[in-house]
Image: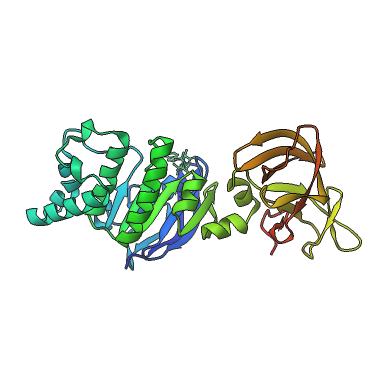
Amino acid sequence: MAEIVIKGVAKQFGAFTALHSVDLTIHDQEFMVLLGASGCGKTTLLRIIAGLETPSQGEVWIGGRRVDHLPPRARGIAMVFQNYAVFPHLTVFENIAFGLRMAKLPQAEVTRRVTRTAELMHIEQLLKRYSGELSGGQRQRVAVARALAMEPDVILMDEPLSNLDALLRLEMRAELKGVLAASKTTTIYVTHDQVEAMSLADRISVMNGGFIVQADKPTQVYRNPAARFVGSFIGNPPMNFLPAKRGENGRWHVAGKDFDGPDVAAAEFAIRPEDMHPAKAGLEAEVRVVEPLGPHTLVTAQVAGQPFRAVLESDRAISPGEVITLAPIPDRIRWFDPETQEAIA
Ligand code: ATP
């Protein structure tokens, strides 16, 4: 059992607060992704869990044991970082075996584990090669194999795929997902890449300015953002937002059209670009730019003077300067509190 519990963890660097009292539970064998823009505190949180950084406040528990006063090696974790520290002067076998030798495992066990993880990562044919001769993707596999060989309860990864080219990233992403699901470890994975986060995670913790804004399943984070920030950060292109005003009839006026909405005094209207279709009645959008993307067409427009994007089926020709009418799918409309920026249920 390696549940990870983070209780009220805060971190100050001098006068700067990198983390504000974070509470988060990562379940046993869960794949949790920490997602956020550069500087939001995700690496700091990972380093605190790893023991490479001391929290200013709060507690870290792994597998029912409080660990925030323990050194990294006593926490039962393995780590894979961006600059994956594979030793070039060692063979692939010795790189993977490195931690096992430090732990003084018998030779037969070292061989068993190295062989097994090398097979898992499809690098068994490279075991005798020197790591300095490997490609970036191969080195990355060695780094992951080395972490898996420790058979840790917990693996922490910080942007492990960021040095790879786009195609290799895609391939490694699918492999990592398969391997980690089979290995029964609890994984915390840091990235600023939302597609990577959506693809890998059991749950995503979306971070902003040292806070966790939402920790939820990828589909929930996408469909039901808990805050405006989440809707504006996740999705490519992100959610559209439009000001709304409550009419006397109780309905909401949005860009000259009426919508049913929540029973509150103030709200902002939001819709994802793919949650609309051209129709007779709807939001009038003045088309500025049309980008055919193959299966879809991305339309950048203005609605009531606000920037607005729609992802439409590519069967209908649309031209810049044209005014098109877009009907939002009613149950895909979301509303946010303009003050708190939180979702209105
Ligand atoms: P990135 O994706 O760029 O790595 P991040 O979300 O991982 O970003 P952190 O590395 O956790 O961000 O940093 C959070 C904030 O804390 C940043 O503003 C950073 O400048 C600051 N910070 C991190 N480490 C230190 C340090 N040792 N001293 C001072 N400030 C720091």
Please report the residue visible at 38 percent of the width from the left and 36 percent of the height from the top: 164
Please report the residue visible at 67 percent of the width from the left and 46 percent of the height from the top: 313
Q: Quadrant of ligand 1?
A: top left
The picture places residue 19, in percent across and down from the top left corner, at: 49, 50
Q: Is residue 158 visible?
A: no
Indicate the colouring scheme. rainbow
Q: Tell me if 269 is positioned left or right of 168 in this view.
A: right
The picture places residue 227, in percent across and down from the top left corner, at: 63, 55
Q: Quadrant of the C terminus?
A: bottom right
Q: Quadrant of the N terminus?
A: bottom left
Q: Quadrant of residue 291?
A: top right
In this rendered view, identify the residue nearer to me: 330 or 206.
330
- From this viewpoint, which residue is outermost toward the front? 315
Q: Tell me if 106 is positioned left or right of 156 in this view.
A: left
Q: Tell me if 219 is positioned left or right of 298 in this view.
A: left
Please report the residue visible at 64 percent of the width from the left and 36 percent of the height from the top: 292
The picture places residue 110, in percent across and down from the top left corner, at: 13, 53
In the depicted structure, whether residue 322 falls above or below residue 341: above
The picture places residue 269, in percent across and down from the top left corner, at: 75, 53
In this rendered view, identify the residue nearer to me: 5 or 319.
319
Q: Is residue 345 visible?
A: yes
Please report the residue visible at 16 percent of the width from the left and 44 percent of the height from the top: 93
